[in-house]
Amino acid sequence: MSTLESTLRAAPSPDVALPVDETGSELKRGAFFNTIALLASNFRGVFTFLVARLLGPAALGTFAVAWAMTDL
């Protein structure tokens, strides 16, 4: 048996720390931010209605153009 084969067959030393699987925490964080984005997007209609009623059609037009530019 060569030294390469003996090195490959040797058991890993217990001193080596294995990386922790953080997939679960990343999924939780992503789900949280997706939920926040979903809730925030539902308020867009309410905010548009308030702009239209409180500020009038000119401000609604400006708001719509600004929203369209940022949405691109």
Image: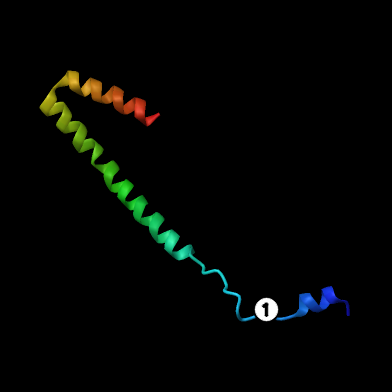
Asked if residue 23 is positioned above or below residue 36 in the image, the reply reads below
| Horizontal side of residue 33 vs 16, given as left or right | left
Label 1 Cα neighbours within 10 Å, binned few <14 / some 14-19 / many ≥20:
few
Asked if residue 25 is positioned above or below residue 71 in the image, the reply reads below
Residue at position x 57%, y 74% from top?
Answer: 17
Q: Position of residue 33 (x, y in %)?
A: 35, 52
Asked if residue 68 is positioned above or below residue 26 in the image, the reply reads above
Task: Check the picture and name the quadrant holding the C terminus.
Answer: top left
The local secondary structure at tag 1 comes to loop
Residue type indicated by callout 1: Pro
Q: Position of residue 37 (x, y in %)?
A: 32, 46
Task: Check the picture and name the quadrant holding the N terminus.
Answer: bottom right
| Horizontal side of residue 50 vs 37, given as left or right | left
Corner quadrant of residue 57: top left
**Observer-nearest of 41 and 14:** 14
Corner quadrant of residue 54: top left
Among all residues in the image, which is located at the extreme right? 1
Find disc 1 in the rendering and name its residue.
Answer: 12
Residue at position x 13%, y 25% from top?
Answer: 55
Q: Position of residue 52 (x, y in %)?
A: 16, 27
Q: Position of residue 60 (x, y in %)?
A: 20, 23
Residue at position x 61%, y 81% from top?
Answer: 14
Residue at position x 30%, y 25% from top?
Answer: 66
Corner quadrant of residue 18: bottom right
Asked if residue 16 is positioned above or below residue 53 in the image, the reply reads below
